[in-house]
């Protein structure tokens, strides 16, 4: 009588699981590095938006705003646009928006 050999052996399954485990171990640590990079780029983009709104305010009113609250009160910014995704507050001094280094 012929034997039916259509399935995987236990050794083959263990080898596949070991390869998948090694790939996961290599992949997971890189996710943490990427999220920091994305957060930093998101913060840089938000600072650029705030600076653009400062420049728009200057064109509309002929002077720079005193602080970011003035931009919020006048409708140029939303209140949550003064804090980066990584919880750093955007600093506004002398007409320039930035984040602390």
Image (tube, helix red, strand yellow):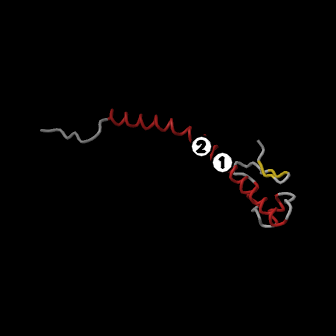
User: Dot 1 corresponds to which residue?
Assistant: 41
Instruction: Compare residues 2 and 79 and report the one nearer the observer.
Output: 79
Residue displayed at 27% across by 41% down: 7
Q: Which mark is first along the chain, 1 or 2?
A: 2
Answer with left or right where residue 1 lies relative to residue 36.
left
Residue displayed at 59% across by 43% down: 34
In the rendered picture of this protein, how many numbered marks are placed on residues?
2
- Specify few, some or many for label 2: CA neighbours under 10 Å numbering under 14, 14-19, or 20 or more: few
Q: Position of residue 19 (x, y in %)?
A: 41, 35
Find numbered disc 1 in the image and state the secondary structure of the residue it sits on: helix
The N terminus, quarter of image:
top left
User: Dot 2 corresponds to which residue?
Assistant: 34
Residue 34's place in the image compared with 79, above or below, is: above
The reply to whether the C-beta atoms of the residues labelled 2 and 1 are less than 8 Å apart is no
Instruction: Compare residues 35 and 1 and report the one nearer the observer.
Output: 35
- Specify few, some or many for label 1: CA neighbours under 10 Å numbering under 14, 14-19, or 20 or more: some
Residue displayed at 56% across by 39% down: 30
Q: Position of residue 12 (x, y in %)?
A: 33, 35
Instruction: Compare residues 10 and 18 and report the one nearer the observer.
Output: 18
Answer with left or right where residue 10 lies relative to residue 25.
left
Which of labels 2 and 1 is toward the front?
A: 1
Instruction: Compare residues 53 and 36 and report the one nearer the observer.
Output: 53
Q: Position of residue 58 (x, y in %)?
A: 82, 62
Spatial separation of the CA atoms under disc 2 and disc 1: 11 Å
């Amino acid at each position: 009588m012929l034997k039916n050999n259509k399935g995987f052996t236990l050794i083959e399954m263990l080898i596949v699981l070991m390869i998948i485990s090694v790939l996961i171990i290599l992949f997971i640590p890189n996710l943490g590095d990427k999220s920091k990079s994305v957060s930093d780029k998101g913060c840089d983009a938000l600072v650029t938006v705030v600076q653009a709104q400062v420049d728009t305010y200057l064109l509309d009113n002929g002077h720079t705003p005193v602080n970011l609250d003035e931009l919020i009160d006048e409708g140029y910014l939303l209140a949550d646009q003064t804090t980066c995704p990584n919880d750093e507050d955007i600093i506004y001094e002398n007409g320039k928006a930035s984040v602390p280094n």
